[in-house]
Amino acid sequence: MEMKDYYAGTVIPDLGDKALNIAVIGSGSFGTAMANLIVHNGHNVTLYGRRKEAVDAMRDTRVNERYLPGALLSDRITYTADLKEAVSGKDIVVFAVPAQTFRQVSKDAAPYLKEGVIAVNLAKGIEKKTLKRMSEVAAETIPEARYVALSGPTHAEEIVMNAPAGIVAASEDQEAAKTVQDAFMSEQLRIYTQDDMVGVEIAGAVKNVIAIATGISDGMHLGNNARAALMTRSMHEIKRLGKALGANAETFSGLSGIGDLIVTCSTDLSRNRRCGLLIGQGYKAEEAVEKVGSVVEGYYTAEAVYDLAAKLGVEMPVSIATRAVLKGELAPDKAVRMLMSRNKKDELQ
């Protein structure tokens, strides 16, 4: 495959002593793409991966062959398979690991984080056992860190191609959010700050479940009308759950809400949507996840959403039906009939 440097011609600013030392934990698609973007902003970036052979290959070839083949990475990135080396003394540590492993990875990193470090999380999910959002997990594992959630409609495959995108940096610490905004924002990536952590995290987590649902619909060839109806009604579900947890309703109309839902449900770059497509075509959920070949966050988050909705008494029919299909408790065609035969109601209820 021909290699291409999509950032060729980008003028990297000389920030001098204003350049931040940033670690990206997780050398999958999103972690790699973000590391490449940040280093082109003039900051010092260390990319950590747990598999030394994969990290060494990236250093030698400047390509993440497994996740982002064809994209040539900057030669300014430093690589390591040593977590202590990666995070020690860093101003910002970006966690680009799956939601269900964030607790352990952040706990492992905690002893080496410097005082006042900003922890940026890219994961979108709800922890299955505890039903906690990622910021709540971070409060337990890295309590001294200044936590920022980065969320919105951003596929790694397009970030690494330096294509235009918009995203949200959400934090209760607005100075930390603005620091991330300044460090990560580029000519092609626009970043907005937000203080509604609950809304941003709930929207990012649940939309992965909905992307599986719309994928199933498309895999069954139910049409564009069905997909649009699913997405719209599902946004009502996301908003209901968020509001029950104290979120700002306006958040769900923004980039981390409807914006992320649109891109995840509508494009085949989404692993969750691809998983749903396979299920709609007749594959069992476990087979679909294996065939996708990388983490399908919605597959794991569906159970947590189901439990959280039950705990809070929130009505979420699409999410619940999707979880039942994933568990093998309901066939996709029966799930459709169940959703279509629900009692009549006012749209805004």
Image (spheres, rainbow, N blue to C red):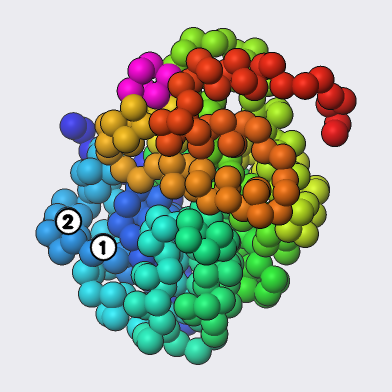
Q: Quadrant of residue 81?
A: bottom left
At a point 58% along the width and 40% down the height, the residue shown is 207
Image location of residue 75, percent across then percent down: 26, 59
Quadrant of res 239: top right
Q: Earlier in the sequence, mark 2 or mark 1?
A: 1
Does residue 46 appear to the left or right of 179 in the view shown? left
Q: Does the magenta stretch include residue 152?
A: no
Q: How crowded is mark 2: few (under 14 residues within 10 Å), some or many (20 or more)?
A: some
Check disc 1 and report its element: helix, strand or loop.
loop
Residue type at the position of mark 1: Gly
Q: Mark 2 points at which residue?
A: 54
Residue 307, image x, y percentages: 58, 51
Q: Mark 1 points at which residue?
A: 49
**Highlighted range, magenta:** 277-283
Give the position of the C terminus as an image quadrant: top right
Packing grade of label 1 (10 A; few <14, some 14-19, many >=20) is many
The structure residue drawn at horizontal position 71% and vertical position 29%, both measured from the top left corner, is 233
* Placement of 285 over or under 336, stated as above or below: below
Q: Which residue lies furthest to the front in this view?
A: 329
Q: Of helix, strand and loop, which one carries label 2?
A: helix
The reply to whether discs 2 and 1 touch (Cβ–Cβ < 8 Å) is yes
Position of residue 204 in the picture relative to residue 31 (left or right): right
Q: In percent of the image, x 44 and y 34: which residue is there?
A: 326
Is residue 194 in sight in this rendering?
Answer: no
